[in-house]
Image: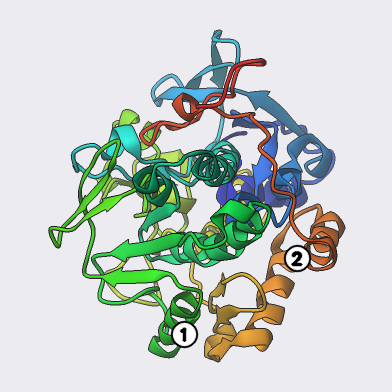
Amino acid sequence: MVIVGAGFAGYEAARSLTKALPPDSGVEIVLVNPMDYFLYLPLLPEVAAAVIDPRRITVSLPATLPGVRLVLGEVNSVSLDERTVHYTDPEGGAHSLGYDRLILAAGSVNKLLPIPGVGEHAHGFRNVAEALYLRDHIIRQIELADATDDPDERTARCTFVVVGAGYTGTEVAAQGPLFTDRIVERHPHLRHQKVRWLLLDLAPKVLPELDPRLSRAADRVLRHRGVEVGTGVSVREATREGVHLTTGEFVPTRTLVWCVGVRPDPLVEETGLSTLKGRLVVDPTLVVPGHPDVFACGDAAAVPDLTRRGEVTAMTAQHATRQGKLAGRNVAASLGHGRMRRYKHHDLGFVVDLGGTQAAANPLRIPLSGLPAKAVTRGYHLLSMPGNRLRTAVDWILDVAAGRQTVQLGLVRSAAVPLDTELPRRAEQGTRTG
């Protein structure tokens, strides 16, 4: 059994398949993934804001998936007729892997829009490398602003633009001022320098997916922290000196964070299978039509939403997690262990961490904000993480008790995290950050 990808869907597929098969089944489960960890994406903004250590959101695959063989590699293509997966290992070697059943859970990558300059001057926010780069970059801009006597350069370096007011962009923008306030405190020369954070989106409001009351609550928190929320506004062109907005305004900045959304992994298109909005077409049991030995789930799959006629499930961690669990059980059922089931799931609500004591949540459709929402949000994350719960909780406590560490780690260069990459490269030891 070969599983491609160890995101929310792939990880849960491996875990549920292991549990669904009897110990003496003789079935080998192979998980192909570029890294040896599962990444808990929802806490990535807290890594960028130095709230928690990046190791907290990386959960070891070998340690938490006993009985699953990990193969490190990036899958390039799938030969359906030959039942073979082709991949490249971390050192550039090409390999092939045969399968009897295949679960495609390749996930998604940054969504790049055809806006001049964005690919060259913006950075995405989908993995640890990008979060660590942004953390260092923010600290570096404040430090460079302190070192210059040019007021225009200082203003540009102290201006941070986030595009995309969905979950990720809103959390990044909400965490941003809290982080830069701590950094500026250590630079007395910047005491009177204004630090600008802008959150832009063509949507009419922040968090358009949420209940209007939660959207308004998040908007209030952002504005109270000084974030300039621009709805109905986006970037028309990005340059080295700043960004031209669709309103005609030019904003001098050295920081453009791209959080406008995601697209299915390029592997989906490489399979040659039928797609819907770029995602693999599957039936409600997650089987690819015409290929009973191939299953797909998570962001890579257009899973019919049986709770909303004619629609497919959203690209969320909640759906990916539950689809992964079902994919594992249905693969086991296809081998005679259990019975096939269809995917049907009602959203249980969402949580958005706004930093500090603020959050927005609607558990079981009950809208919450402030401290109650914060408690629900952090409790939800701790329950959802497959590991590192205690370490994460300790980091939260230390953030309150001891404050944040604001030093550059210098691990990721700018060139290592281009916006249109599927997998940022790790910086070479000894190279200078860019």
| In the foreground, 154 or 37 | 154
Question: In the rendering, at what x and y percent does residue 355 appear?
Answer: 61, 69
Is the residue 412 above or below the residue 360 in the image? Answer: above
- Residue 329 visible within the image: no
Is the residue 133 above or below the residue 360 in the image? Answer: above
What type is the residue that disc 2 sits on?
A: Leu
Please identify the quarter of the rendering in which residue 304 is found. bottom left
Please tell me which residue is depicted at 29% across the width and 42% down the height of the picture.
112
Q: Residue 282 carries which label?
A: none
Please tell me which residue is depicted at 52% across the width and 64% down the height of the picture.
171
Helix, strand or loop under label 1: helix
Q: Mark 1 points at which residue?
A: 214
Q: In this view, does 388 lie to the left or right of 150?
A: right
Cα gap from disc 2 to disc 1, whole angstroms: 22 Å
Helix, strand or loop under label 2: helix
Question: In the rendering, at what x and y percent does residue 161 appear?
Answer: 38, 55
| In the foreground, 50 or 214 | 50
Please tell me which residue is depicted at 37% across the width and 62% down the height of the picture.
198
Q: Mark 2 points at which residue?
A: 382
* Display colour scheme: rainbow
What type is the residue that disc 1 sits on?
A: Leu
**Furthest residue in direction top, as rendered:** 93
Mark 2 and 1 residues: CB-CB less than 8 Å, in contact?
no
Q: In which quarter of the image is the N terminus?
A: top right
Q: In this view, does 67 lie to the left or right of 208?
A: right
Please identify the quarter of the rendering in which residue 233 is found. bottom left
